[in-house]
Amino acid sequence: MMGEVLRIGSGAGYSGDRIDPAVDLVERGALDYLVFECLAERTIAIAVGARSRDPALGYDPLLEERMRAVLPAARRNGVRIISNMGAANPLAAARRTAEIAGELGLAGLRIAAVVGDEVLPAVQAGAAEWPAEIEAGAPLISANAYLGCEPIVEALRGGADVVLTGRAADPSLFLAPMVHEFGWALDDWARLGAGTVVGHLLECAGQITGGYFADPGVKDVPGLATLGFPLAEVSADGSAHITKLAGSGGQVTLATCKEQLLYELHDPARYLTPDVTADFSAVRLEQAAPDRVRVSGGHGIARPQRLKVSVGYQDGYLGEGQISYAGSGAEARGRLALAIVEQRLQRLRPDLRDVRLELIGVDSVSSVGAARAYAPEPREVRARVAARTSTLQAAQIVGHEVEALYTNGPAGGGGASRFARPIVAIGSTFIDRDQALAQIHWETAA
Amino acid sequence: MKLRQLAHGRSGDKGDILNISVIAHDLRDFSRLRQMVTAERVKAQLGDRVLGEVQRYELPGLGALNFVLHRALDGGVTRSLVLDVHGKCLSSCLLDMEIEG
């Protein structure tokens, strides 16, 4: 850290996010830290499957590409990297990162893997309440506790250039460098709360710089094709300025910051993380300059006693089919198509648990409100049938029946598509902290 | 008039719970929003998509309301049969609500 403020960039809002904005940040951002949040709820459960096929896998599929893209500039500019790209296998991710760093000529780069979030044996042994969403005795794929900032802080204290975790709370990835650099106590709830607000604002990357925001004519955003990712200049009291690099697309305004502050928020006074019960209710936002918003007033009280656990399980199969109709009468032909498939499924009686029949373009993603009665007929519709089933065979029948509408259904059905796949679902529960003790493993680039 | 003339908002998901923020474009409209956009009206606007209760939180400093909609994601992102499993499109549906001008 060069001065009074800590500069933390956000390099990814999800696993598949754009890579070039992160490269721009590490090259031009004068950052102290670059954080990549890449782990959605069920990603670990899916990654466990990859690890069981190959013990050297199970980490984020874009880990290698991201590391190759950012490590040289990170080393050159003294930027430390923190990410949950370790997914189901932080150890393998650290090893692979060390290999890549070696190939790039970055000998001596130190990578810390944070492990200890895996609690499947403990959950199976009854150390946590069985998740309400999951049938008793159903086979579980994975169980991972949300770790807080503490082990990441320990890794930073130990000199890590790169810290790779598995399941950790998203804001904790950002809170860790603040705790480390400012020396905040782990029971300084006010500052931990303020820092968690900043982490929450950053964790979805482009969603605070104008992504997931534009509404032409109402909320226009310039340059979404070159959207800049955010960085925060954090002060020792936990207040911060959110901004982005000059010349990048997007915008940082009160409106973009408000939308992101409330994103995935329930009770604003009780935002639960492993580190703190953060209080967003008195957060103040001020436009300090163009593309620069000051955030202050975040607060907090004591952390929750137990850790949240995401539990992955296989929840049957998903079968889906779609087919399109266009021109006058498209909606009526789409409705006929759905009625035919519904009758066919009743006759064939595959083992269906839940079926959804809908018309894309009419009632698939929108709610059916009163306005529907006055809407004009759409120029085209796409009939969609989706079902949850107990067997793969039953799931395949759903798509086949939709596809068979080509020759057996209404006039002018085109562009049929279908798939069937297992469903990896997620339930959640809580576990005592002593069941998920974190450990750090080190790798050094040769 | 439609709610989107006075407010903007964003959907977020956690498990089977959806939240939608409703944020005044102009802070001076917040008291009107608070009066008109009740939890009951939000539930009615989203119709059969919301099976559980709707809670409303107020953030007057930001000119914002936060709605928490339970059992609104067909069992959650990971097992839903809905096309938009995250409910991301539903903030736009909510902003289509007709309000008194």
Image (spheres, helix red, strand yellow):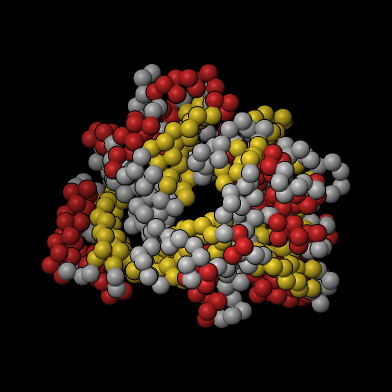
Q: At x 56% / y 81%, what residue is drawn? A: A54
The C terminus of chain B: image quadrant: top left
The N terminus of chain B: image quadrant: top left
Quarter of the image holding residue A352? bottom left
Residue nearest the viewer, comparing A420 with A349: A349
Q: At x 26% / y 60%, what residue is drawn? A: A354
Q: At x 39% / y 28%, what residue is drawn? A: B38
Residue nearest the viewer, comparing A423 with A271: A271
**Up-down relation of residue A256 to residue A156 (above or below):** above
Image coords of residue A375 (percent x, y): 27, 36
Quarter of the image holding residue A116? bottom right
Image coords of residue A399 (percent x, y): 28, 67
**Up-down relation of residue A105 to residue A231 (above or below):** below
- In the rendered image, the residue lying farthest to the bottom is A54
**Up-down relation of residue B16 to residue B5 (above or below):** below
Left or right placement of residue A264 versus residue A245 in this view: left
Image coords of residue A7 (percent x, y): 77, 46
Q: At x 81% / y 42%, what residue is drawn? A: A5
Quarter of the image holding residue A159? bottom right
Left or right placement of residue A347 versus residue B88 in this view: left
Q: Is residue A157 visible?
A: yes
Q: Is residue A406 visible?
A: no
Image coords of residue A123 (percent x, y): 49, 67
